[in-house]
Image (tube, grey):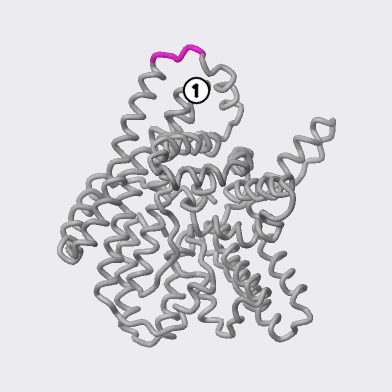
């Protein structure tokens, strides 16, 4: 089930009414677990088998670490192999076979390697990372293993964040599930506002840009100018789409008494490459920092080693997004930005702190680099990007020039609500008017959703990952 399907408009009120009517925490968790399983298995019930397998393996492995401390390392290995093996089989097996077959074919060998003809389970990258963070933290002694399977299963499967995050940590969400919850009208109102704003970002902004972005990246020989305009448009599409999902998830969870991790903090206001990753997909960025970058060595050691660790981390972060070379290229691009910036980081950050007006130059420069990365992310055929880069100053067809200018204008129009909402919300909340303007905002957002809704809605972009 998707947040923007009509079925969800019936599903959510029923879940909320029953959830708050139950009163007792364990009954609420049991109801939430059942609702989450219905939500996740709505179209493909067989996905539930993989989810149950991952949940039971990690719950059992964590309990085993407490009972048999001498076997902690082996039990962690069981968790890693089960989760990463499942992820590799369903997400990367065919990618590996395709590239291995191409390499063998170049040598004159044609072994006919078997491909898997299965759908990629939605959300598998998110819930495997969430499960792994639990077992790794138990192994490190940072949290205690949970004996209550109901609470742990509800933590893994909670439907607002199950499919596309935020990637929750057990230390953050499990205590909320283990504590009593009472109905709070203020949090319900705030959650509804946040969820409606998320739906607005998805339906009105992201889905309106999507057809034009699709057309640009389907052109066989686009000019560099057209690709650049497409990168700008896609930067807004993916932000509105993914931040929209996160806001719906956080708003829905807040209506049930939970606070999910923040995932975005004005990422295109970043002034440097490290700052971008402190603002974009924050729950994932901190995950790869804590469970990949730091264990590999982090910023310790000689410069060459730090550079190697940074590149490996970002290459794997890119590959996490999908089994395709364009995602690897995107990860490599950002890894190289981080490596190239590192020698100058101290001086640049001190200069920005002493002279904040330099941000007027740094923000557009960083945004331009981010958009260049989004071109690699969106264009699956890297040869297309290569041809455009080889002839950057070539003649631009008149039609492509017109489309590029029009797309930039459309992107500017799409950016306005995102900029206005951030400033408007800060002022209204600070003034104490929030309870009074909420109904007006709900009506305005609902009207926009009604006007822009399409009969064939688009899935959220991160459902593919």
Residue 395 painted magenta: yes
Number of marks in picture: 1
Q: Is residue 156 visible?
A: yes
Q: Is residue 30 left or right of residue 254?
A: right
* Residue at x 26%, y 44% (from the top left corner): 452
Q: Nearer the viewer, residue 187 or 353?
A: 353
- Label 1 residue SS: helix
Range covered by the magenta-colored residues:
394-398
Q: Position of residue 297 (x, y in %)?
A: 71, 57
Q: Nearer the viewer, residue 400 or 110?
A: 400
Instruction: Quadrant for residue 410, please give it.
Output: top left
Q: Is residue 75 above or below residue 163?
A: below
Q: Nearer the viewer, residue 258 or 41?
A: 258
Residue at the farthest top position? 395
Q: Main secondary structure of the magenta part?
A: loop
Q: Is residue 93 visible?
A: no
* Residue at x 84%, y 30% (from the top left corner): 108
The residue identified by callout 1 is 224
């Amino acid at each position: 089930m998707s947040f923007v399907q009509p079925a969800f408009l019936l599903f959510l009120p029923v879940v909320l009414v029953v959830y708050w009517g139950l009163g007792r925490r364990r009954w609420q968790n049991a109801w939430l677990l059942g609702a989450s399983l219905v939500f996740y298995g709505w179209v493909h019930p067989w996905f539930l088998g993989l989810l149950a397998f991952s949940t039971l393996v990690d719950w059992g492995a964590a309990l085993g670490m407490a009972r048999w401390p001498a076997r902690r390392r082996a039990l962690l290995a069981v968790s890693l192999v089960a989760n990463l093996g499942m992820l590799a089989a369903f997400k990367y097996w065919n990618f590996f076979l395709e590239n291995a077959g191409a390499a063998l074919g170049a040598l004159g060998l044609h072994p006919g390697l078997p491909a898997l003809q299965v759908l990629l389970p939605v959300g598998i990258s998110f819930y495997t990372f969430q499960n792994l963070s639990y077992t790794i933290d138990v192994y490190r002694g940072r949290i205690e293993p949970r004996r209550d399977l109901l609470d742990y299963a509800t933590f893994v499967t909670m439907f607002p964040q199950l499919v596309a995050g935020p990637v929750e940590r057990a230390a953050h969400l499990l205590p909320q599930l283990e504590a009593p919850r009472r109905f709070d009208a203020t949090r319900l109102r705030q959650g509804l506002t946040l969820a409606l704003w998320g739906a607005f970002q998805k339906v009105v902004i992201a889905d309106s840009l999507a057809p034009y972005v699709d057309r640009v990246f389907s052109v066989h020989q686009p000019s560099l100018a057209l690709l650049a305009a497409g990168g700008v448009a896609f930067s807004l599409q993916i932000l509105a789409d993914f931040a929209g999902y996160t806001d719906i998830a956080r708003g829905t969870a807040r209506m049930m008494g939970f606070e999910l991790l923040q995932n975005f903090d004005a990422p295109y206001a970043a002034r440097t490459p490290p700052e971008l990753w402190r603002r974009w997909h924050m729950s994932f960025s901190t995950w790869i920092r804590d469970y990949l970058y730091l264990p590999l060595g982090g910023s310790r050691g000689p410069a060459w080693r730090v550079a190697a660790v940074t590149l490996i981390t970002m290459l794997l972060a890119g590959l996490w997004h999908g089994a395709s070379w364009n995602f690897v290229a995107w990860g490599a691009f950002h890894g190289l930005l981080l490596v190239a910036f590192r020698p100058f980081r101290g001086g640049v950050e001190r200069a920005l702190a002493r002279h904040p007006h330099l941000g007027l130059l740094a923000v557009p420069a960083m945004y331009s680099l981010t958009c260049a990365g989004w071109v690699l992310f969106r264009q699956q055929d890297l040869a297309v990007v290569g041809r455009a880069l080889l002839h950057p100053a070539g003649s631009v067809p008149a039609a492509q020039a017109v489309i590029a200018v029009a797309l930039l204008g459309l992107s500017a129009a799409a950016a306005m609500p995102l900029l206005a909402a951030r400033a408007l919300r800060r002022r209204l909340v600070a003034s104490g008017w929030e309870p009074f303007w909420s109904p007006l905002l709900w009506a305005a957002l609902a009207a926009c959703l009604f006007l822009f809704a399409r009969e064939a809605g688009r899935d959220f972009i991160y459902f593919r990952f």
